[in-house]
Image (cartoon, coloured by chain):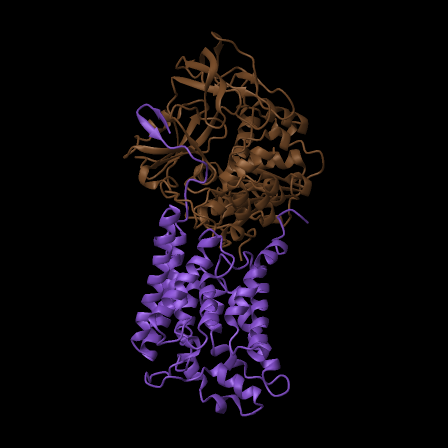
Amino acid sequence: MLQTFPGGKHIHGFKDFSKDKQIVSLPLPSQVIIPLSQHTGKNSQLIVKQGDKVKTGQKIGESTGFISSCIHSSISGTVSKIAEYNHPVIGRCQSVVVDSDGNDELDSSIKSRQNVESLSNDKLREIVKETGIVGLGGAAFPTHVKLSPPKQIDTLIINGVECEPYLTCDFRLMLEKTKDILRGVLILKKILQTEAVYIGIEEDKPEAIRAMRNKIVQMKLPITVVPLKAKYPQGAEKQLIKAIVDREVPAGKLPLDVGVVVSNVGTVLAVYEAIYDGKPLYERVVTVTGKIVKEPANLRVRVGTKFSELIAYCGGTTQVPAKIIMGGPMMGLAQCSEDVPVIKGTSGILIFSEDELEKKNEQPCIRCGRCIDVCPMNMLPYALSICGENERFERASKYTPFDCMECGACTYVCPAQRRIVEYIRLIKAVLK
Amino acid sequence: MSKIAGINLKVSSSPHIHSGETTTKIMWTVFFCLLPSGFMSIYIFGLSTLWIILSAILGAVATEWCCCTVQKKALTVSDGSAVLTGLLVAYNVPPQSPLWLAFLGSFVAILFGKIVFGGLGFNIFNPALIGRVFLMASFPVLMTRWPAPLNVDAVTAPTPLAIFKDGFSQNNMLSAGEMINFSYRDLFLGFRGGCIGEACVLALILGAAFLIYKKYISWHTPLSYITTVAVFAWVFAGEGFFNGDFLMHILSGGLIMGAFYMATDYVTGPITKKGQLIFGIGCGIITGIIRLWGGYPEGVSYSILIMNAATPLIDRFVVPKRFGNM
């Protein structure tokens, strides 16, 4: 029996479009739009002004509190404008527009380090903070905060699950950057001083499991690869912890409350590059995929590149796009324009044609109980959806709406095609 | 929708994909899984059975159509639930009963069992059973006139349960097999008196097995229901204790149809698996009490309706333990 968590639902992966496509670098964009909010927490504070010359990797936004992060220029050139611009998550955001000089000249602060072993943990944390690393799995939580737990951690879990359908960027990284990821894991292990280290990967990615295991044996590392049942949302932090070490994070608490830190494979790689190469987080791998994308791809992209450029690089689409989603189909955000920049949390760009859109014909709940069976948090989604529909928000608070992580499993299985997650979001917004 | 660069992009809340499962698909699947039992009944009780089934379905669909039209609501006829209710009403009347009986039963089932509560999803009681108990109360003679199987001319042949009950109450202690003159095999295949749908246990179980395989129904309600009736019958139905003919109680009457197709109704049963176990046990106990000591030979429909009434209470107290709530 493979390890897993209670609830959840197997969802067809749709990963074949891009899973065999090697990561390639997108040609340097002529202009980037870098929003000052790309992470959970406070916005970064602007430290450049219009007309300034900037270099690749130069800091342009300073972290403004404990839960905040730095932001760097992703190309070299001139700051042509500082203005509000489209943002894939929050709609509009103060952004720095940099026009490329075409040279991609690295900032002088970026140097590779030889003496990594001799660096203190505080210094390592400092580097992670200064290089602007945030969780690349989606939530973009500042990584240096995760690496400064207020109490002792005993387990480090590396998230290589990638349970969202369509997305393959983490899968490709595990195949192509196996060694660097493992060296990144060792850095995290050193900072957190944990004994146990696990890498969780779903069983439907046997190549990744094999690659990781082989490299671990070769490098003689004290790391265990745990194959997990392919089931959505296996990659959700709390569900991953439950599956691997059978601990339940109490409602409203964090993984560190049960002695665990979880980090995504992409984030671990970014930590490796920051420590060894001194490289700030100014680029990431983005999966561009969908049935109508001519050449689906896994692209290494500079932060701030417009979606339209990635789509154009993939040859465009065979049909008119009807929906463009940042992230996967289960938790991703539908965009109202192609004219939005890639940010640190952009794991994928998924394009649907008109035929692929779910045609929702919402009906009353027939109380079939499927939502309860799949809810990974063991909630009563049907009850919340009825409360939301009837705007009975006080009553809804009884059903603990804030436990919901909006994974969408309930809405995916609902035969009455109810917009359960949407109702829960409404309830949360009202009760907040 | 936003219009930028000449394309219309649709913006909506995640998730952006759906399993493709729909209420309509579920209703029609249950409908088709019930059909083999109907075919067996047509074979056993004659072609008139077919007309009864069609009349009941017509009654249900016509009532739903009229109500939707009068209420100016979107037509819900095609979602299959009215057709399914009609079929279940037909399965709950005796073969060779007049056509208007089934039609009237369906009319009551849809109007007073479903529409008055607000339509599908809002009803408290199983609509088909509302139809049945209405007919039982209003036309007790018509509802208990059973033609003999494979012999359309014999007008009345009491149901096994009725024979068993009468025999039992007269303290005429013959062995169950002798007394009712039905073999378990006959009961299993459907060669006995009874309502249209409940005759052929084999056909009902085949359909139910498919529904369980497709996860359209779960085993919790039927298994706990049938097991409870069996245990109850084994303990109390015989001479003294612990020698009742439980197999006869499982195979006869409407238990199999009720347990697999009516107690499992999503809308009127508990929503959690644990609640469904309680529901099944409750149905089993009430069925046993009615069958052995009540005024009717059969108690399946009343037991389900009574437990339907208890469903909100069960759902209120039986909730899953939330993740991270130790």
**Res B241 visible:** yes
Residue pushed farthest left?
Answer: A318
Q: What residue do we see at 33% from left, 62% from top?
A: B58
Q: Would you identify the image quadrant in which residue B242 lies?
A: bottom right
Snapshot quadrant of residue A128: top right
**Above or below for A278 versus B29:** above
Q: Observer-nearest residue: A258 or B37? A: B37
Residue A140 drawn above or below residue B200: above
Provide residue B181's location: percent of width, then percent of height: 45, 89
Q: Is residue A36 above or below residue B219?
A: above
Chain A appears in which tint? brown
Q: Position of residue A167 (x, y in %)?
A: 43, 39
Relative placement, left or right, of B113 versus B322 is left
Residue, x 43% and y 57% (percent of image)? Answer: B111
One can see residue A213 in this view: no
Which residue is nearer to you in this view: B96 or B206? B96
Q: Which residue lies at the image location 71% right of the left edge and 33% below the top edge?
A: A150
The one nearer the camera, B99 or A253, is B99
Farthest residue to the top: give it. Answer: A51
Percent across and percent down for residue A270 are: 53, 30
Please identify the quadrant where the C terminus of chain A is shown: top right
The chain assigned the colour purple in the figure is: B
Coordinates of residue A164 in the picture (x, y in percent): 46, 42
> Would you say A356 lies left or right of B209 here?
left
